[in-house]
Structures are given as C-alpha cells and as structure tokens.
C-alpha cells in the first residue's frame, strides 16, 4: 500500500509541477492552457485533438497525470535495486529527471501520434531540462524514499 500511496501522491505532485511549468512557460508565449493539454492528447489521437474541444482537454489532463504517475512508479521500482535514488535525493533525482527528459523527447514523443519529436531548442530546452530535473526527478526520488520507508 505504501508503494501505491506514494506513487499516486508523487504522480500528483510531478504532474502538477510540470503542468504549472508548461502553463506559465508557454502561457507567456501566448499558449492557452487548454491548447497545451490538447497537445498532450494529440500524442494519443493525433492532430485532430486540437479541434476536439473540452473532451480532448480533459483527455490531455488525464494522460498528463498518467504519464507523471508512471514516471514516479518507474523511479519507485528502480530505487529498490538502485538505492542511491533514495539516499541522495537531490543529485540522483536530478539525474533521474534528465533520464526522464531523454525518454520523453527521444522515445515517447517521436513514437506518438503527434508526429513530432526531437529536442527543444533555446529557452525551451533550458526550461524542459530544469523542470525535468527539479520538478520531475527530485519529487520522484522523494516519492521513492517515502514508499520505501519502514513504518515506525
């Protein structure tokens, strides 16, 4: 139950931090929050997601939190065999976040229905690296430690 509890909690934290980052970063560039989540839904259903209205916004939100939770679950499970993820939360979490960034941008997105792929450039790259290191990897490492903690 601890694994489930802290994986779900970690997924909520990671998903929220990443969503806030996207809404602020891309919002400053004119993107509306609904469009950001439709872009995520496009990974599953293709470019038509942009014309899907509120249903594809909701789908994008659900997919976003599902992916965030899976990233945390992988960290929790990986930390069982690689305890450095639980012992050195900040540096190990940042490295895990970089790995998550690479998997997302070099594997997941290119194989999605968006037809996109490749690494972002300039400020987009800096933002993506920072949010994955600090807003994805570090909270995932904290969730892994909490899931593994012994009851007192």
Image: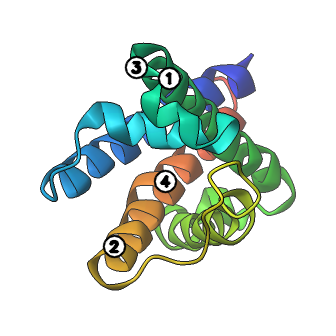
Question: Foreground: 102 or 12?
Answer: 102
Dot 1, crowdedness within 10 Å: few (<14), some or many (≥20)? many
At mark 3, the secondary structure is helix
From the viewer's perspective, is the residue at label 4 or at label 2 nearer?
Answer: 2
- The residue drawn where x is 70% and y is 51% is 75
Dot 4, crowdedness within 10 Å: few (<14), some or many (≥20)? many
Whether label 3 touches label 1, CB < 8 Å: yes
From the viewer's perspective, is the residue at label 3 or at label 2 nearer?
Answer: 3
Q: Which residue carries the number 3 mark?
A: 53
Classify 39 as above or below 131.
above
Question: Foreground: 96 or 44?
Answer: 44
Q: Looking at the rendering, which quadrant does residue 76 occupy?
A: top right
Whether label 3 touches label 4, CB < 8 Å: no
At mark 1, the secondary structure is helix
Q: Which residue carries the number 2 mark?
A: 124
From the viewer's perspective, is the residue at label 3 or at label 4 nearer?
Answer: 3
Q: Is residue 72 left or right of residue 51?
A: right
Whether label 4 touches label 2, CB < 8 Å: no
Dot 2, crowdedness within 10 Å: few (<14), some or many (≥20)? few
Q: Earlier in the sequence, mark 2 or mark 1?
A: 1
Q: CA distance from mark 4 to mark 2?
A: 16 Å
Classify 80 as above or below 147.
below
Dot 3, crowdedness within 10 Å: few (<14), some or many (≥20)? few
Q: Which residue carries the number 4 mark?
A: 136
Q: Return the mark for residue 56.
A: 1
Residue 17: image location, x then y, percent: 35, 43
């Amino acid at each position: 139950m601890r694994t489930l509890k802290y994986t779900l909690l970690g997924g909520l934290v990671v998903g929220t931090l990443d969503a806030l980052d996207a809404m602020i970063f891309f919002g400053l560039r004119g993107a509306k929050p609904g469009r950001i989540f439709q872009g995520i839904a496009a990974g599953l259903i293709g470019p038509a997601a942009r014309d899907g209205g509120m249903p594809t916004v909701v789908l994008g939100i659900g997919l976003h939190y599902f992916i965030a939770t899976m990233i945390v679950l992988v960290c929790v499970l990986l930390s069982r065999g690689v305890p450095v993820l639980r012992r050195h939360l900040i540096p190990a979490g940042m490295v895990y976040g970089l790995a998550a960034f690479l998997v997302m941008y070099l594997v997941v997105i290119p194989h999605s229905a968006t037809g996109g792929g490749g690494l972002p450039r300039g400020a987009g790259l800096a933002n993506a690296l920072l949010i994955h290191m600090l807003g994805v990897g570090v909270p995932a490492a904290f969730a892994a430690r909490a899931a593994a903690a012994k009851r007192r």
